[in-house]
Image (spheres, grey):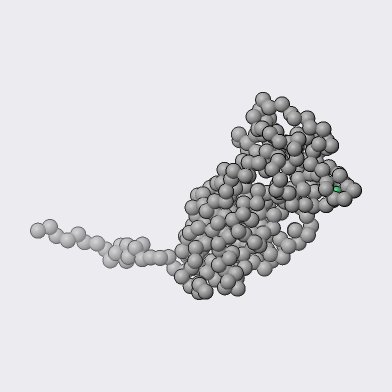
Amino acid sequence: MRPLPIVPSRLISQLCHCLRSPASPQSKICLTMARPSSNMAHFRTCFAKAKHIVIISGAGISAESGVPTFRGAGGYWRRWQAQDLATPQAFARNPSQVWEFYHYRREVMLTKEPNPAHRAIAECEARLSGQGRRVMVITQNIDELHRRAGTKNLLEIHGTLFKTRCTSCGAVTENYKSPICPALSGKGAPEPETEDARIPVEKLPRCEEAGCGGLLRPRVVWFGENLDPAVLEEVDRELALCDLCLVVGTSSVVYPAAMFAPQVASRGVPVAEFNTESTPATDRFRFHFHGPCGTTLPEALAPHETETIS
Ligand SMILES: [Zn+2]
């Protein structure tokens, strides 16, 4: 019979220490400060306590519904990207071409649907409002997928594809016409070899206010334009009041999450990122969940066991 190996007692105590789990509360806090946690159970504890949740969403959540952004690698409409056409200068130079671009984007949205991430957010808002709790979505997306999923508390900081603003009288109008005007019917094809339609300006979408007839433009915030100050004021109010913030489908190093989320984190409020990519800025946030938000969000926002469902 082999003798039992002799193990120094100090080694045993070290082994026991290593096996002991979890880490003490103090070391857990240190870990949290060092890098964001991807512990869903910890996030769910914060979620269960939150009374006022702000969700900042960006292009990534729309991309999961197949919505093209016309930015980044491969993101072209004809030979251009959004930053070439979504400007006041481009509209002044060639309103026909810019309207073709937006007409195409509007028509594309007829074939797209909200995905499980949009639906999880809308369902969470409806459920929590029955418990006297608030969910507010602040989105940079102009495709209205949050609205179509049923989200009510919504700040569309970049406007929407489905509103117009008159360049003469300033009237803002909802507009879901397809096509938005007869001259744009069948136009707007995205292929690089497509010829410009060169639609005369009087045949482009025009204001229907009595006696106006001015040229309409999409009610979206273009590159080089400022956000609506009234909307920004509402954003500020929400950021100041929230006790949990989710950043969904947008990198925390780019606008607008780069402006908003650190403001919330600096108050000590938990911020959780849901994204398919890690970002260098995530170290200042409490949580980071890697992967498609259509997968991570439904789990994160599902009813918590402590919720009283009426
Ligand atoms: Zn007008």
What is the x, y in percent for residue 138?
Answer: 66, 57
State which quadrant residue 85 falls in.
top right
Observer-nearest of 146 and 187: 187
In the image, 115 versus 227, the foreground residue is 115
Locate residue 42, reporting x and y percent.
Answer: 48, 64
Residue 232 x %, y %:
75, 58
Q: Position of residue 117 (x, y in %)?
A: 54, 54
Q: Residue furthest left?
A: 1
| Image-quadrant location for residue 239 | bottom right
Number of numbered discs: 0
Looking at the image, residue 94 sits to the left or right of residue 32; the answer is right
197 versus 120 height, above or below: above
Q: In the figure, is residue 47 to the left or right of 100?
A: left
Q: Quadrant of residue 271?
A: bottom right
Say which of 286 and 211 sits in front: 211
Taking the spot 77% from the left edge, 48% from the top edge, the residue there is: 164
Q: Is residue 268 visible?
A: no
Q: Residue at x 55, y 62 (%)?
A: 123
Relative side of 57 to 160, left or right: left
Task: Work out which quarter of the rendered image holds the N terminus and state it.
Answer: bottom left
Which residue appears farthest toward the right when viewing the image?
211
Tell me, yes or no, if residue 106 can be seen here.
Answer: yes
Residue at the spot 29% in from the left edge and 64% down from the top edge? 12
Residue plotted at (67% across, 25% down): 193
